[in-house]
Amino acid sequence: MKTGRAELICTGSELLTGKLNLYAPLFHANLSALGFRIAREQCCGDSLEEIAEAVRAALKRSSLVIACGGLGPTFDDLTRQGAARALGRRLVYSKDCARILSFNYGLKKLPPNFRNQCLLLEGAKALENSRGTAFGQVLTRGRRMLVLLPGPRREWEPMFPNFLDEEIRAFFRLPALAQVKLRAAGLWETQAEKLLRPAMRRFRKLDFTILAGPGTVDFIVSGDDRRGAVAGAAAACRKLLGKTVYGAGEDTLASAAGEKLKAAGGTLACAESCTGGLAAKLLTDIPGSSAWFLGGAVTYSNQAKLKILGVKAATLKKYGAVSAECAREMAAGARRAFGASYAFSVTGIAGPGGGTPEKPAGLVYFGLASPGGSRVFRRQFRGDRAFTRACAANFILDELRKVIK
Amino acid sequence: MKTGRAELICTGSELLTGKLNLYAPLFHANLSALGFRIAREQCCGDSLEEIAEAVRAALKRSSLVIACGGLGPTFDDLTRQGAARALGRRLVYSKDCARILSFNYGLKKLPPNFRNQCLLLEGAKALENSRGTAFGQVLTRGRRMLVLLPGPRREWEPMFPNFLDEEIRAFFRLPALAQVKLRAAGLWETQAEKLLRPAMRRFRKLDFTILAGPGTVDFIVSGDDRRGAVAGAAAACRKLLGKTVYGAGEDTLASAAGEKLKAAGGTLACAESCTGGLAAKLLTDIPGSSAWFLGGAVTYSNQAKLKILGVKAATLKKYGAVSAECAREMAAGARRAFGASYAFSVTGIAGPGGGTPEKPAGLVYFGLASPGGSRVFRRQFRGDRAFTRACAANFILDELRKVIK
């Protein structure tokens, strides 16, 4: 199958001085769905010459070049100018863009830094930005396309479904590709790979990618979808992964649990110690979660565990806060305090400090109280504080979704 | 100021198809300590032509080029060949390398894939690998240096202290560099730029970068530190930014508040509605936060606000949950329930749904209860759900740190 050759240029000195560039996988996902593979990815500092040279060279090699970042209103935003120099084109002031900004921000007269945002490469089409002042730009020349996108993910990401998918499809006429992302939890990347091997062998012409997260694995199937190959492969993979699959696409463990709660007419509360609000945050990331999430208690101190959740002083004294007994009482207490049908609890040692030989950093107990009874779990995670906390939150959200009838 | 110009080329098709490249910040740390800045970072797939072109172009632009990955023994490891083609040099079999591998692996006769590992660019110096079979290679030509490194971090990272630091220092003789990151909140990127302009004019030879976050701005000063220029510029910037500066380096708003609480012997609790645990999560991201953070209540339902925080039913009825009155009672309730000296509350409409003309999505009220009395704030944020929630959490953490005596 023929795929188009794309290149990605990310601009911003911070990407060369310590900030991680998280964008390559995201652009890969957007572009591979359109039939493009990224053949080269580059990061440039905020330098006019650097950007111009990178754009010029990329357009020589590739039919689609995306430059991301450097479209803001400040002195170090130089991508527009760099692209203009690379192409030998002028920047022209767009009255349409000015009208859109005036309208969106309720301004009669645009201040100078807004006026800069209205400069387009001569001949370029502007892509409206629903979340910022920087327009995206699409310029075609011969059989090549150059796309300029604003740097923040929340600004450029919606431009794909809103405009770019269609622009790229229409201009290049590549075969329709499909992509399915399956999301699973409670298994390792290597376990997933082993389980999936038969499907990968059977559907040799498709692309498969495994991405490991904290206690989660994403599995992406993509390729030419004629004869429904991608859907067929995804169905085969789903079968092989069994109950570890919690969703697809943009589903999260929290949204999967939320959907099941909504369907069952249940409500949820939680009690967190070592995750310190992370699980509640993941649940309330979901718009409309107030329909089934009643609330949570972050009980970092023993006093709060006693007072708000009704954990017994004797339990804390005899077993300690990091124990199966405390986890069970925390979950029951949260269920009672918030009047919810389901409640879970997390109590452990996130680290790096606070561990002992008996209870090392990474040890976490969980409680799960539901209409059908209560359970406790014990897990030992290995990683830094952030990873341990993420694994713990994902673990209990996964158990929660499995227990909801 | 003169810093050396370096480029990084990472090879491996996985970097272009979904795997995050974690190396740029690591190489930045190693190289900036040597007086080099990375001017360009690229990822290439496992293609001979692609690698050769990237190496050739990078050596034209930069005095130090590091290519990482693709030195393994399998068919898709092509960096040696790509570099040889870029330079027009042969690959020669090194008997020294063969002796080292024989010794390290206790082999009398090397198998074919081990023999491949002994191919060096003509004129290159080999860097021993204590954790694998792939040698690093250093080749100088005129005033340029090309370095080939194995892909796995655990293999290339020790090569810096063991060999490369010294190789690079001896060959280039560059001045020492410094970098300071100031972190501020409660102002816009453009406001920060305006405030900082005098310092940027005064210290023309240094590099300045502004990074905007949700309600926060980072400002990075870097350059040649002879005569303490970087420290001087950072001090000048700090003065210009005034109280908006909450920290430096890896400080966060939560850690800044935590430090002040610890110094003051205070304790903290919180009550969150629309941020749904995010503020507590940010506070408990900090190792050791249990010393001053007692806990929080995520009160998503009205019932939870009444029962756990003691908000009055009359208040909810008369003003609603998203109101200054409710925010004030939530903060007071959290302070009481957890027995903390400071408490804050957040209640608003994160969106996208749930807004009305009087109370649109993005409207958030905050309460702050402290030994010195209580305050409420009202802010209207513009952005999606995640951005609004991040802005809201950052806003109240910033107000908290400012109020702690």
Image (cartoon, coloured by chain):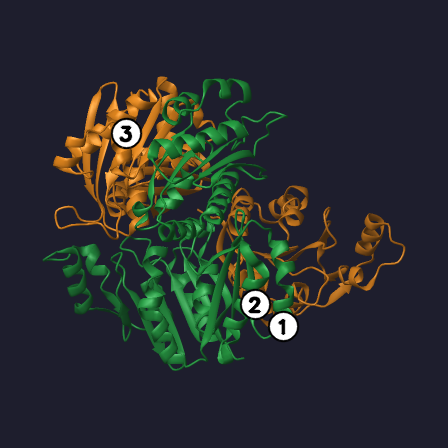
Chain colours: A green, B orange
Quadrant of the rendered structure where residue B54 is? Answer: bottom right
Amino acid type, residue under disc 3 in the picture: Lys
Residue underneath mark 1 = A202
Label 3 residue SS: helix
Q: Do callouts 2 and 3 point to residues on the same chain?
A: no
**Does the residue at mark 2 contact the one at mark 1 (Cβ under 8 Å)?**
yes
Query: Can you identify the residue that label 3 sits on?
Result: B307
Q: Nearer the viewer, mark 3 or mark 1?
A: 3
Query: Does residue A88 appear in the picture of this structure?
Result: no
Residue A273 visible here = yes
Dot 2, crowdedness within 10 Å: few (<14), some or many (≥20)? Answer: some
| Labelled disc at residue A236 | 2
For badge 1, the amino acid type reads Arg
Distance of label 2 from label 1 (alpha carbons): 10 Å
Chain for mark 2? A
Left/right placement of residue A263 relative to residue B332 reads right
What is the number of the mark on residue B82?
none
